Amino acid sequence: MEPDLNKLKLNWTNYVEHGILDDNTRPIIQRSWEYCKKTKKDINGGKGETIDACQLEQVLAENRELIKIAQPIMQNLYEIVLSSHFVLVLTDKNGVLLDTIGDEVVSMRASELRFLKGTVWTNDAVGANAIGIALEEDAPVHVVGAEHYCVSHHTWTCSATTIHNVKGEIIGVLNMSGESHKLHSHTLGIVVAAAYSIENELALSHTYRSMSASLDSTEDGILVTDENLHLQWMNVGAQKVLQINMDEFNKIGFKKIFKKMDVADEIWTNEETTRYYTDVTAHIANRKIQCSANISRILENDKIQGYSIGIREIKHLHSAVNRVSGNVATYTFDDIITHNAQMRMIIKTAEKMARFKKCILIEGESGTGKEMFAHAIHRASAFSQGPFIVVNCACLPRDLVESELFGYCKGAFTGALNEGKPGKFELAEGGSIFLDEIGELPLEVQAKLLRVVETYTVSRIGSQSERKLNIRIIAATNRNLEQEVKNKSFREDLYFRLNVIYLHIPPLRVRGDDIVWAASHFLDRLNREYPEHTKACSPEFLEGLKSHPWPGNVRELQNFIERTFYLCTDPVISTAYLPAPPPKYAEEKKVLSMTASPSLDDLVKANLEKILKETNGSVDASAQMMGLSRASLYRKIKKYNIDIKDYRYMSQM
């Protein structure tokens, strides 16, 4: 039932002149009138207050998104439903008009009341009106004729409701005003429906921004395509991985970039939601980017509407594999305990050489600490943040050596994984690979390893392309590789490629001072671990340790001290627990004992001659490798009666 405009006018007159209200006065109107009377609002006023241009510019900027979303909805509503005799108004949360749409006649009348962009239409500013009441009550409201407090509004009918953001906060009002005699019972419902549409669009926009921000915050690349693999959207991560934008991507085309991912041509089972590819190559111009990928279908009514594709550079997958596999270096040079002058020199040399990318060859008997040196070199190098891959070449089955080291492609051989598999060299990308017991590699594998060492590229079994490597190669052996080369069991060219920087770790038996030092260190560690069973070594016991040849070197000494600690029931370990010397070392005892200094001199001389040979008699290079000054090196050359010309002559032969 439409309200009687005359009765509304009479009720308004009785209230403003006599303070009398009709019992049928709506509470929402009564509260508004009482407020206007309390604040002594002029019933003959009611024209909107205009804010200055600078304020308006700021208000419009603050409400940019609301205006952008509301305008097309308001325009559509006006053209389809209202067409004439009404004006649509959008305000901010403070009642400032942001936008108006209406027919010319109504707009001209509205301008007389300053019902224009940049004016304030709160109850405080213009008396009780639909916009002001909606803001006060946070509810939809229609105000008809004389329900307005000011006389100049009595010829108007207004319907308004608040607009909220995703937090439920009021951010504006949508209002529809027209001539009072044009009031229709559905007017308020139309306004509420339009405001609801605006709120939905705001929520969708917020969700889109939130999702975009979340998806852009990940390093993973995300691509969204239509059913024909035409790119619709890509996140920042995808642009970084592929180094192209969406237009450039579509110009090349999905199938040319991901040549072996026939997503649209593959048959999906009903149960499949996502497919995973552990090794995919993205071809961008002359660049090849190795990635892992997962692909999900976008379905609507069981029909494919597109695909969502996640990509990640393969180095991140390898990094995760290395973390799970524990491929990290744990030792530093500080962990290598020694009191021996030659060992200190070797450590100093290794520290210097760690800064360079060149291959390092470490020779020494089993148990001398070659792997500890490899760990320490990696930790001190520019590759320290990358993985540390340890490969024991002696433990690799002969028929699997190539696939383990170099990897293989899909279908390379019977039993190969469907997606192929990266080799140890690929897993070491950005870090170091330690090839322990390299002298055990078969000759046929050495040929392929030579190619990797020379070019720092690797080709998987079954692949026609090579992958560039950024790694440090460290090799170690307990054999004499120079002799192995002479025996034709190790390639000479590979030996020289690996032997760019050479370290020889002397056996423990020629480092008598280290025997006592290391034994004491191991015992102290056990005493800290088991304080209730603290023990000490007698001087005779320590002296006896120096006489043992220790064929297993530091590893054997450590195990022996630990075993003796557990077996000895006395607080002092006596000579009764000394090990018996192995038979084959009985005749060598006098030669190997560090009580005779010539053994150390012989070792130093042999090492110096070996380095001079490798550097073709270069004093600078030899001094650098040994961590000595030129003057110190010349003194050693003179001391050991070495003729440096012999080594320079050998290089010319």
Image (tube, helix red, strand yellow):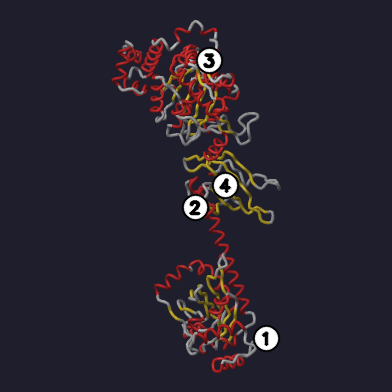
Gap in angstroms between the C-alphas marked 3 and 2 = 81 Å
Total labels: the figure holds: 4
Say which label, 3 or 2, has the lower sequence index: 2
| Residue 55 in the image: above or below residue 399 | below
Instruction: Count residues near mark 1 (Cα–Cα under 10 Å), then give few for <14, some for 14-19, many for 20+.
Output: few
| Residue 341 in the image: above or below residue 529 | above
Query: For mark 1, what is the residue?
Result: 1
Gap in angstroms between the C-alphas marked 3 and 1 = 114 Å
Say which label, 4 or 2, has the lower sequence index: 2
Say which label, 3 or 1, has the lower sequence index: 1
The mark closer to the camera, 3 or 1, is: 3
The spot of residue 172 in percent (x, y) is 53, 72
Task: Look at the numbered discs 4 and 2 and tell me whether their residues touch, using CB distance below 8 Å.
Answer: no
Amino acid type, label 1: Met
Question: Would residue 453 appear left or right of 651 to someone viewing this image?
Answer: right
Gap in angstroms between the C-alphas marked 4 and 1 = 59 Å
Query: For mark 4, what is the residue?
Result: 310
- Answer whether residue 438 is visible to the viewer in this image: no
| Residue 590 in the image: above or below residue 157 | above
The mark closer to the camera, 4 or 2, is: 4
Q: Image point 43% across, 73% down: which residue?
A: 56
Amino acid type, label 4: Gly
Nearer to the camera, 213 or 73: 213
Q: Which mark is residue 574?
A: 3
Gap in angstroms between the C-alphas marked 4 and 2 = 19 Å
**Please, what secondary structure does the residue beneath circle 2 have?**
helix
